[in-house]
Amino acid sequence: MSNAVEQAAEAARYRTTGVMVSKEGVPTDKAAAVANDFLHTPFMRAALPFINGGVSGMVATTVIQPVDMIKVRIQLAGEGKTGGPKATPLSVTREILAGGKALDLYTGLSAGLLRQAVYTTARLGFFDTFMGSLSARAKAKGQAVGFKERATAGLSAGGLAAMIGNPADLALIRMQSDGLKPIAERKNYKSVIDALSSIAKSEGVGALWAGATPTVVRAMALNFGQLAFFSEAKAQLKTKTTLSSNAQTLTASAVAGFFASFFSLPFDFVKTRLQKQSKGPDGKLPYKSMVDCFAKVAKQEGILRFYRGFGTYYVRIAPHAMVTLVVADYLGWLTK
């Protein structure tokens, strides 16, 4: 089916024979030429990596949102305790569905889509832009882009995008964790805009960047694992295997998802804790900083708590990476 779609798209873009006419009375080859010229304007060449990145991230988030909801609830379960029952994906899912609404698994979807529209648009756009610059520089020197350059591009793109997208990320965590609070204390956010305005009004605009440090570090770690290893794995598969292009992309995505999960989960865990926290009766926050959160969780809950839910996190990260990168790859091919 994928090959058929690609062939159809290729035919639509590069048809140079025949006399078919569009609804507007313009020969299809001329219409295709106009569209092709537009795609190759300087503005569109610079904008396409960002547009394709945002669209692919939003598609992936819509598919993976329930898994992300479960991942966040697992990370927040048993906060400050060393014992007690261990939260599992099944137990958390049952708890959410016990409320009688399967759509609760999609809580925070609007925030997730906004986050992807900002964060993934920026990180994939920056990564493609950085890689294009590095490739041109390497080509001028008669060299090839290596893993070091890919890693640098991934780390830089992830850090910049995370800082820009932190407010949407914060709103997502607040919306997903709201159901854990006593009914009287719940904010019952109606949408991501409601969450952002409520947080800014009650806690100040600066609060929208709460947890920005672990968010940036987490994004850099995730992008290092995802983009650098995806690019490297695909390059290796292309030269050392006979797999089809689609198989190379899927395999490289799975590899990238594992490394992205391994490197970023501890920072994702701390980010979730910091963004969810609120002042206690004494007016103080449970955690002062990323380092303080790492120290308190390690002491009170054990070091392995940082990797609790790794399977769920991988199931959230890997498919999201696969869908994002496959869609981005296809959009990149379609608009090349």
Image: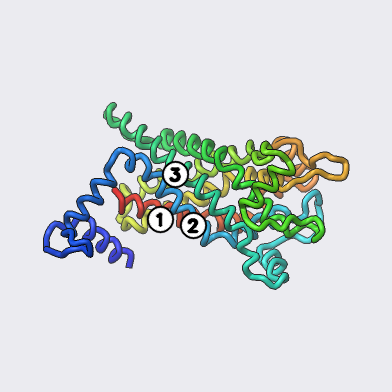
- Mark drawn on residue 327: 1
> Among all residues in the image, which is located at the extreme right?
282
Which of marks 1 and 3 precedes in the sequence?
3
Question: Which residue occupies the foreground of this view, 29 or 216?
Answer: 29
Q: CB of mark 1 within 8 Å of CB of mark 2?
A: yes
Q: Where does residue 314 sit, x and y in percent of width and height? A: 56, 55
Q: How crowded is mark 2: few (under 14 residues within 10 Å), some or many (20 or more)?
A: many
239 relative to 250 in the view: left or right: left
Q: Say which mark, if any, is on residue 124.
A: 3
Report the side of 300 relative to 276 (left or right).
right
**Helix, strand, or loop for circle 2?**
helix
Q: How far apart are marks 1 and 2 (CA)?
A: 9 Å
Residue 155 x, y percent position in the rendering: 50, 36
Q: Is mark 1 on a helix, strand or loop?
A: helix
Residue annotated with mark 2: 60
Find the distance from the CA under tag 2 to the CA under tag 3.
14 Å
Q: Can residue 74 be seen in this view?
A: no
* 1 or 2: tag closer to the N-terminus: 2
SS of the residue under disc 3:
helix
Image quadrant in which the N terminus is located: bottom left
Q: Do tag 3 and tag 1 residues touch (Cβ < 8 Å)?
A: no
- Amino acid type, label 1: Val
Q: How far apart are marks 3 and 1 (CA)?
A: 12 Å
The amino acid type of the residue labelled 2 equals Ala
Callout 1: 10 Å neighbours few (<14), some, many (20+)? Answer: some
